[in-house]
Image: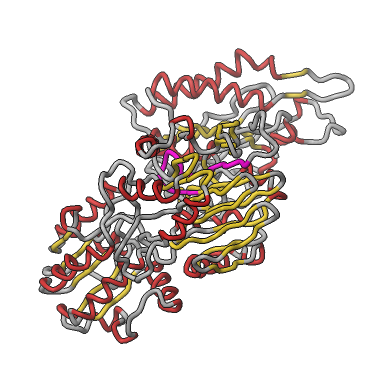
Amino acid sequence: MIKNTTASALKVIPLGGLHEIGKNTCVFEYGDEIILLDAGLAFPTDGMHGVNIVLPDMTYLRENSHKIKGMIVTHGHEDHIGGIPYHLKQFEIPVIYGPRLAMALLAGKLEEAGVSHRTELRTVRPRDTVRIGKNFLVEYIRNTHSMADSFTVAIHTPVGIVIHTGDFKIDHTPVDGEHFDLQKLAEYGEKGVLCLISDSTNSEVPGFTASESSVAPNLDRIIAQAPGRVMLTTFASSVHRLQIVLDLAKKNNRYVGVVGRSMLNVIAHCRNLGYIKCEDSIFKPLKEIRNLAEDKVLILTTGSQGEPMAAMTRIANGEHHELKIRKGDTVIFSANPIPGNTIAVVNTIDKLMMLGAHVVYGRDKGIHVSGHGCQEDQKLMINMTRPKFFLPVHGEHRMLIQHSKTAQSMGIPASNMVVIDNGDVVELTENSMRVAGQVPSGIELVDASRSGVVKASVLKERQQLAGDGVVTVAAALNWEGKLVAKPEVHLKGVVTSADRAEVIKLITQTIETVLSDRWSEFVKPATADSQVDVDWVGVQTQIEKAIQRVMRRELQSNPLLVFLMQIPEEAVRSEKAPVSPGSLEAPKLLSSPSSPSSPSSPSSPSSPSSPSSPSPANQVTGRRRPRTAARAAS
């Protein structure tokens, strides 16, 4: 909640990118106007089963969508634009400004997601100025990064000028000849910058970040010495690296095959826009590549981070239908693992080596440089802009802390900076900077189908399934609170030293005990005006709790319980048709389920009307059901 806000203050609200790497999203709010800066995604951790994409919690923007006037995009990396198609399904963004390459990549994403009509894309060039709403004027300043067409932005607001660096390093010999516009930064430093919001990724690393051009000689040597095929994997969005590799392929008389959807997509857009320059003849389809001499082949692939479905990972697993590792192949990992991916990367490297490949990897080989500035780059940024206030972003907590120390060493008082978390509201006025509260923050998870958000409760159930398995219990009850037949109990993925027959016996006894001891609590006897009324959901809840206690005690674990309870058919009849309890026929036992989410096997030959196939109208599946028998049985 935002408390005691100042009406004339600029609010800066990062929703992602703090205390983490990825999903960079920042809100600027003044009065009744909001603009967004970037909207990225992150990738799931090992415990996020079935999750494909991690997004920031956008509750605040959904609730204030009427204030949104537009978005500014700094560059086209996934952690800066990957979330936009998902957000546009929830709220409209009137206009999105960004570099040509980022807009080209984004246009394809929006088209694929079917949300192109919910915004307008407009491209910008260096030193272009755009007005968004009444309160924001934004100038795009060319910077240097691992991706082409990257920008720092100067945001003119009623309280002063705020500079957001975007992702940057200061590369004096850029591959594309597009230099960092340090002159424009210096001009802003002379005018006066109220606040600098700066990339903290490499704040723990001393010195300057090496130029992208520095990897070329080392890659040239490795490719020239390779006796057979060369396979090189890097980030698909590392446009300058791709240009270097294509130039070296030509120099070493090798044809290039491209593998991986994202790699193909980026190269196609970059060639169309002129960010990658090469002859058409250098590319060959994989079918033709197979017929060339091995020392004439270079294959560019995705998978530098060990992603399960990426091309290099499938090649290492022997699962790629067109490429197999041969003895004499040289595989180059021209990328360092990002945090969280190290194990996946080293496993891929091990598998490639076992297949006979010579794998070149590691920081000491000089085949990769970061796209983010180190301490000296950060000092130069501070020195050029000379801000009054400082806000470190884009990094884990220790990186933000170190960046703030660097800023203090450059003369910015500790009282003029804050280290914050996602969702914190920073209020800026001409003379002050403070944290004024918090808005909802956190994560939203998109499952592998990319069609729905995975709620926390669903993720918890998936984790429980993976960790302790599932126990399915099916029981049928009659009006007297007795079991019609012995319950069916199935244990899937459950590890226990106890005898399974004994576990099933204990669960049966537990159900019988609950029914005998507590049945009277859930039954209202029949009267002259009404039939017997049973709180079937209450019965089910008590049975579930009792079974869970037994499982924790006997199994020494906490498997997911799926309890299916079948009740008499007449329990869901209209209250207008009272029936004597003695005349009711007990239901048949529910057939055993094939999965936690399926009460009956889909392959069962029983027809819906057969006695062994229970009607949906007389079963209760026991998870968060309404508190009436008729509703519970629906």
Q: Nearer the viewer, residue 632 or 111?
A: 111
The furthest residue to the right: 529
Give above or below for 8 relative to 606.
above
Q: Quadrant of residue 307?
A: bottom left
| 190 part of magenta stretch | no
Q: Nearer the viewer, residue 531 or 454?
A: 454
Q: Quadrant of residue 557?
A: top left
Q: Position of residue 381 (x, y in %)?
A: 39, 50
Q: Which residues are magenta?
A: 10-24
Residue at (23, 77) in percent of width and height: 249
Give above or below for 427 relative to 228.
above
The furthest residue to the bottom: 281
- Is 36 left or right of 324, judged from the image as shown? right
Q: Position of residue 135 (x, y in %)?
A: 67, 51
The furthest residue to the front: 190
Confirm whether residue 340 shows in the render. Answer: no
Q: Position of residue 198 (x, y in %)?
A: 44, 46
